[in-house]
Each structure stands twice: as structure tokens, then as C-alpha cells.
Image (cartoon, rainbow, N blue to C red):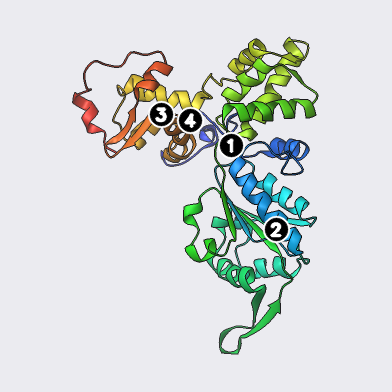
């Protein structure tokens, strides 16, 4: 048999699968449905992001006082922090309809032209993951944002003709998780830019209490604090953990949530006190137990946990680095003293020698 061939018996992945992570900040189908009911409807109800909320409130109030459309708004930050929610609040505050699309859905300038030409005056266009839009569409957006006009090209070659198309005034709300990928000409056309920060535990407690009230879940202060402390600074994760703890409480504790019930439920779902899940602990465990805390190359570490290099680098590492449990160095990944303490292990007294030096970054 040719070992490069894949038969029916080898179709299943050989390593652990982490596609259903409870602490993943990206929205799945269930999140999308539930978030629609839990989203705040105005800035007063929105929890956290005090600076962005205050600045945005001034922008919207000034626009309403002038009787004009609001300036274009760019919101950047990690997934799950409320960028989509804020875009809907902007539309509600301006008493305007909202159109929602995403950068990956706009692969041609014609796709964008079709959307722009159908906008109503004052409408809010929410463009998620704006950094993933195609370059031709991006260049068309420059003129649309600044002059409320697009040139539609009819025909090809020497006979092509540019037909100018006037657009009604509209507000573009762009959202991105990677603001550095936006070209400066596009960033400069936004009148307001807000960066969404991770939430403090006290803010997440307020999110949990509010969501519990809307979901008709009984939860005390300590139970909310336990969920908030494991939510990785992200409201979407807090709401997801609350729903899973609610399920546990309904089966095991007559529906009431306190600290003990929350801790027991999240132990079942393998989310520890700092918000680490199976994948996070697998990466740390391999780094500490197999490689003495590093340094070790990313590819080697990925093989050790049975995952793809991209999964470890893009899914697990950002939170571990932010928590101060792992460091990226020119020589490779290195565990911090906090990582040893978190897993209850004792770091070696001397640097790891021998074969450890074979693994580079």
C-alpha cells in the first residue's frame, strides 16, 4: 500500500480535535442565535468599554444634533468583545436601518457596488472582518466613503466605460480583529476609531448577571464571579459558560447557580480557574513535561500535542502569552514560572541541556 494514500480507515484525524472549544471567542451557530436576544439595545445598556462608549456617544449625539449621518466608524479588537453589538447600537441610536456583510463575502468590486447602490440615505453598513476584503473592492470603497460615489466599469478593454454612480450619505461601520492589516488610506477615511479592550472581571460579572436575568437563571454574586473569572476577558465566552453552567445547574442543583455549582460545572467542561481548556493545558503540559519548559520550536511543540502548527500558534498561544504563562523567544517557546505554578509542577533547578538545544524556533 502507498503510505500517501488515504483509505476509509484513515479518514479520521489522528490527533485531538479542538473545533468545539467552549472558550473559543469566535461565534458558532448557537452563539449567533442566543446573542440576538442578549444584545443591549443602546449605549446606556452596553457594559464595559467605557472610553469607546463615551467617545462614540459624543459622535452620535453630535451627528443627531446636526441632522447628518454619523461619521464612518472603525472598531478593532479580539473576537467576542462587542463590535457587532456596537454596530447595531449605532444604527439604533441614529434611528437608521442596518445592512450586515463581511469582508470575505466581497471578493469583487461589483459585489461592493451592488451593496452600496442599494443603500438608503442614512443607512448603516456593517462590514465585519473588513481587512479580508479584496483589493479592487477596497479601492472602490475609498471613493464611496469620501465622496459618496462609485465608478461602475461597463465593458472590457479599450471600450470600457466608467459610469459614475451617486450614493446617498451612509455610515460605514468596519470591524476588524487585525487593524494592522488595514492599509493607511482606508484607516484614514474613518472619522472615529475605537479599540475594544478585554473586559475586567468586575465588568464580566455585570455581563453575567444581566444575561442570567434575561435567560431567567438564578445566580448569586459568587457564582457570577466564578464564571467571569474563567471567561478570558470576553463577554461571548462568559455568556457561553453561563449557558453550560445553567444546563448543569438544572440537572444537578434545581437550577440555582452558586460558586460551588459553577466550579463543578466548569470542571465537567474542562475549563479551569484561569480559563484554560484542554488544548491550552496540553500545550503547557508538553512544554513543561517533555521539554523542561523550553525553549522549543513551534513545530516540535505542535507535534507533541498532536495538533497542526497553525492551531497551536493561532488558537492556544495568544491567550497563554496574554496570561503570562508562555513566552515567544527567538530560540523558541518558553514557559514562565507562572506556568509551572499553574500546573503544580516544580521547575528544574538548572537549565535544560543536551537534546533540548536541538529544537530551534
Lower sequence index among marks 2 and 4: 4
Q: Which x, y percent locates residue 31?
A: 69, 36
Is residue 44 or residue 110 the one in the foreground? Answer: 44
Name which quarter of the figure residue 121 lies in.
bottom right
Per the image, the residue denoted by label 3 is: 324
Q: CA distance from mark 2 to mark 1?
A: 33 Å
Proximity of marks 3 and 1: CB atoms separated by less than 8 Å = no
Lower sequence index among marks 3 and 1: 1
Q: Which x, y percent locates residue 251?
A: 75, 13
Foreground mark, 3 or 1, reads: 3
SS assignment at label 1: loop
Q: Is residue 187 left or right of residue 228?
A: left
Local crowd at mark 3 within 10 Å, few (<14), some, or many (≥20)? few
Per the image, the residue denoted by label 1 is: 25
Residue 249 can be seen in this image = yes
Q: Is residue 268 above or below residue 156?
A: above
Local crowd at mark 4 within 10 Å, few (<14), some, or many (≥20)? few
Lower sequence index among marks 4 and 3: 4
Say the numbered circle drawn on residue 14: 4
Proximity of marks 2 and 3: CB atoms separated by less than 8 Å = no
Lower sequence index among marks 2 and 1: 1
Is residue 224 or residue 113 the one in the foreground? Answer: 224
Amino acid at each position: 500500500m502507498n503510505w500517501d494514500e488515504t483509505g476509509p480507515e484513515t479518514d479520521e484525524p489522528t490527533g485531538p480535535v479542538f473545533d468545539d472549544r467552549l472558550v473559543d471567542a469566535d461565534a458558532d451557530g448557537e452563539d449567533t442565535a442566543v446573542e440576538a436576544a442578549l444584545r443591549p439595545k443602546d449605549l446606556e445598556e452596553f457594559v464595559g468599554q467605557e472610553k469607546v462608549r463615551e467617545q462614540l456617544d459624543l459622535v452620535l449625539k453630535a451627528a443627531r444634533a446636526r441632522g447628518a449621518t454619523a461619521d464612518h466608524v472603525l472598531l478593532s479588537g479580539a473576537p467576542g468583545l462587542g463590535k457587532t453589538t456596537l454596530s447595531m447600537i449605532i444604527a439604533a441610536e441614529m434611528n437608521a436601518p442596518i445592512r450586515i456583510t463581511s469582508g470575505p463575502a466581497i471578493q469583487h468590486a461589483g459585489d461592493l457596488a451592488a451593496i452600496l447602490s442599494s443603500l438608503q440615505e442614512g443607512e448603516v453598513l456593517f462590514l465585519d472582518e473588513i481587512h479580508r476584503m479584496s483589493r479592487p473592492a477596497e479601492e472602490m470603497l475609498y471613493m464611496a466613503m469620501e465622496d459618496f460615489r462609485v465608478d461602475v466599469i461597463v465593458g472590457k478593454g479599450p471600450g470600457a466605460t466608467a459610469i459614475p454612480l451617486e450614493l446617498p450619505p451612509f455610515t460605514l461601520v468596519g470591524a476588524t480583529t487585525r487593524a494592522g492589516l488595514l492599509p493607511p488610506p482606508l484607516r484614514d477615511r474613518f472619522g472615529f476609531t475605537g479599540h475594544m479592550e478585554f473586559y475586567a472581571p468586575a465588568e464580566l460579572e455585570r455581563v453575567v448577571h444581566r444575561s442570567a436575568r434575561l435567560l431567567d437563571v438564578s445566580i448569586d454574586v459568587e457564582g457570577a464571579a466564578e464564571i467571569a473569572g474563567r471567561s478570558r476577558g470576553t463577554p461571548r465566552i462568559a455568556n457561553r459558560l453561563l449557558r453550560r453552567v445553567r444546563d448543569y445547574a438544572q440537572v444537578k442543583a434545581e437550577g440555582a447557580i452558586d460558586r460551588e455549582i459553577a466550579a463543578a460545572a466548569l470542571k465537567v467542561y474542562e475549563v479551569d480557574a484561569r480559563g484554560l481548556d484542554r488544548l491550552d493545558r496540553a500545550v503547557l503540559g508538553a512544554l513543561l513535561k517533555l521539554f523542561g519548559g523550553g525553549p522549543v520550536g513551534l513545530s516540535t511543540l505542535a507535534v507533541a500535542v498532536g495538533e497542526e502548527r497553525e492551531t497551536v500558534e493561532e488558537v492556544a498561544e495568544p491567550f497563554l502569552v496574554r496570561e503570562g504563562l508562555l513566552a515567544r523567544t527567538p530560540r523558541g517557546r518558553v514557559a514562565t514560572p507562572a506556568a509551572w505554578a499553574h500546573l503544580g509542577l516544580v521547575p528544574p533547578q538548572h537549565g535544560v541541556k543536551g537534546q533540548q538545544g536541538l529544537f530551534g524556533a
